[in-house]
Amino acid sequence: MAIQTTTHLNFRGTARPALEFYQRVFGGDLVAITYADAGAVGDPAEADQVMWGQVAADNGFRVMAYDVPTRLPYAPGENPFFVSVRGDTVAEVTEYWSRLSEDATVVQPLGPAGWAPAYGMLRDRFGVVWVLDVRGE
């Protein structure tokens, strides 16, 4: 089993320019999936904002980012990041989920998603928000 943790930054409408900046600084490949790309548009004004974005470089640099939709609270400095844990299998991620979820608040239950065999989000007992998903099986 191999897991990877990545800082997942939260923005309000500026995720794409932030990812482009980090790509210029660290190199690597940039991927940005919009809310429209994922078929998850809640507000038409946010259709082209980033629902999932990442810069991954051969030098080991990794950062993920997304634009927090206006239907969710966002206060820069209060919820600027998530910790993303990506595993190889649903079983592996489920094991980490069950441990992290002790005394946690589940934001999104772990389950299948349109972009991953499993995805979930929780705020642990210390207030840290974790996003767990599966790379693919």
Image (cartoon, rainbow, N blue to C red):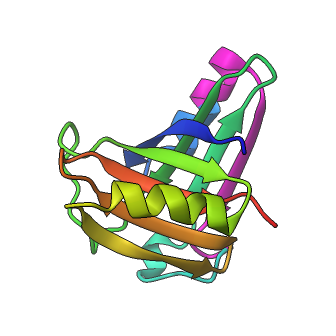
Using the rendered view, name the quadrant where residue 90 is placed.
bottom right
Which quarter of the rendered picture does the C terminus lie within?
bottom right
Which quarter of the rendered picture does the N terminus lie within?
top right
Q: Position of residue 78 (x, y in %)?
A: 17, 42
Which of 86/30 is in front?
86
Using the rendered view, name the quadrant where residue 42 is placed.
bottom left
The span picked out in magenta is: 21-37
Vertical arrangement, residue 58 with respect to residue 7, above or below: above
Find out whether residue 35 is within the magenta segment: yes
Picture residue at 73% right of the left edge, 48% below the top: 31
- Whether residue 120 is visible, yes or no, is yes
* Relative side of 73 to 115, left or right: left
Which of 130/97 is in front?
97
- Whether residue 50 is visible, yes or no, is no
Q: Position of residue 35 (x, y in %)?
A: 57, 72
Picture residue at 45% right of the left edge, 61% below the top: 97
Using the rendered view, name the quadrant where residue 121 is placed.
bottom left
Vertical arrangement, residue 67 with respect to residue 61, above or below: below
* Relative side of 96 to 62, left or right: left
Which of 35/79 is in front?
79
Which of 136/31 is in front?
136
Find out whether residue 137 is within the magenta segment: no
